């Protein structure tokens, strides 16, 4: 059977976060959702998309699925607007004690790389991102995907932790620019001192 993910509208996402009984039951039954969030990646990647579904059993690897996916918009007049959608993370087999995984689908690390902050090359950025993720309850990185795992009854709180984590890490680009400006100013000061243009 083809893998299917339901694409929630913004209203559908809010209903999920508010604890809509039908959507909650769907999650526990294995339904998997994706929804655009209010956040936008810097650069060309567009809105941050959250992938929500059962966390894999005994594994931190969300993996990826190349199976065909059908898009469904839950508030469309017919209920579903089925169109081909790109592959997204496969959440694996659910565990006996289910947790819900909210993942970025790999967008955050791709965004950082696009902004010149490649985690495989820049060890300072890598350690900073690792620390930010470690500080967020239930968060982790697996197969290039940043995620937050949360109990089914706390999906709303878990989602907002996920959004906060994404915002904090995306904000690192400003620190990178600030560091570059500080280094430039120090270089200018050093050159001025060398040329004797500054009073001692």
Image (cartoon, grey):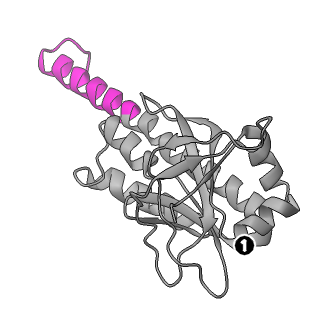
**Residue at the farthest top position:** 197
Q: Give the secondary structure at mark 1.
A: helix
**Looking at the image, which is closer to me, 136 or 53?**
53
Task: From this view, report whether residue 87 is shown above or below residue 32.
Answer: above
- Whether residue 194 appears in magenta in the rendering, the answer is yes
Image-based side of 45 in relation to 118, left or right: right
Q: Residue, x 71% and y 72% (percent of image)?
A: 29
**Res 116 quadrant in image:** top left
Image-based side of 63 in relation to 27, left or right: left
Q: Residue, x 25% and y 55% (percent of image)?
A: 120
Q: Position of residue 193 (x, y in %)?
A: 19, 21
**Looking at the image, which is closer to me, 50 or 130?**
50
**Looking at the image, which is closer to me, 30 or 106?**
30
**Res 153 quadrant in image:** bottom right
- Whether residue 50 appears in magenta in the rendering, the answer is no
**Looking at the image, which is closer to me, 140 or 134?**
140
**Res 127 quadrant in image:** bottom left
Task: From this view, report whether residue 123 is shown above or below residue 143.
Answer: above
Query: Which residue is identified by label 1?
Result: 28
Count all numbered tags in the image, as a single digit. 1
**Residue at the farthest bottom position:** 96
Q: Position of residue 177 (x, y in %)?
A: 38, 31
Is residue 137 visible to the viewer in this orientation of the structure?
Answer: no
Circle 1 Cα neighbour tier, 10 Å, few/some/many (<14 / 14–19 / ≥20): some
Task: From this view, report whether residue 116 is shown above or below residue 131.
Answer: above
Q: Magenta residues?
A: 177-200
Q: Residue, x 12% and y 21% (percent of image)?
A: 194
Q: Position of residue 60 (x, y in %)?
A: 46, 74
Q: Residue, x 42% and y 60% (percent of image)?
A: 65
Image-based side of 49 in relation to 98, left or right: left
Is residue 109 visible to the viewer in this orientation of the structure?
Answer: yes
State whether the magenta stretch is mostly helix, strand or loop: helix
């Amino acid at each position: 059977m083809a893998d299917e993910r339901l694409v929630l509208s913004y209203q559908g996402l809010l209903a999920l976060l508010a604890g809509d009984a039908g959507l909650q039951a769907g999650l526990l039954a294995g339904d998997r959702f994706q929804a655009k969030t209010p956040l936008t990646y810097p650069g060309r990647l567009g809105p941050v998309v959250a992938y929500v579904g059962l966390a894999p059993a005994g594994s931190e690897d969300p993996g990826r699925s190349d199976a065909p996916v059908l898009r469904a918009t839950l508030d469309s007049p017919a209920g579903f607007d089925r169109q081909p959608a790109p592959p997204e993370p496969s959440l694996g087999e659910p565990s006996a004690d289910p947790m819900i995984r909210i993942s970025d689908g790999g967008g955050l690390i791709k965004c950082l790389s696009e902004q010149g902050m490649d985690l495989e090359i820049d060890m300072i950025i890598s350690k900073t991102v690792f620390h930010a993720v470690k500080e967020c309850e239930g968060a982790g990185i697996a197969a290039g995907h940043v995620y937050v795992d949360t109990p089914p009854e706390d999906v709303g709180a878990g989602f907002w932790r996920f959004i906060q984590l994404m915002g904090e890490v995306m904000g690192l680009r400003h620190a990178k620019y600030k560091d570059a400006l500080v280094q430039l100013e120090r270089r200018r000061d050093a050159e001025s001192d060398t040329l004797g243009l500054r009073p001692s």
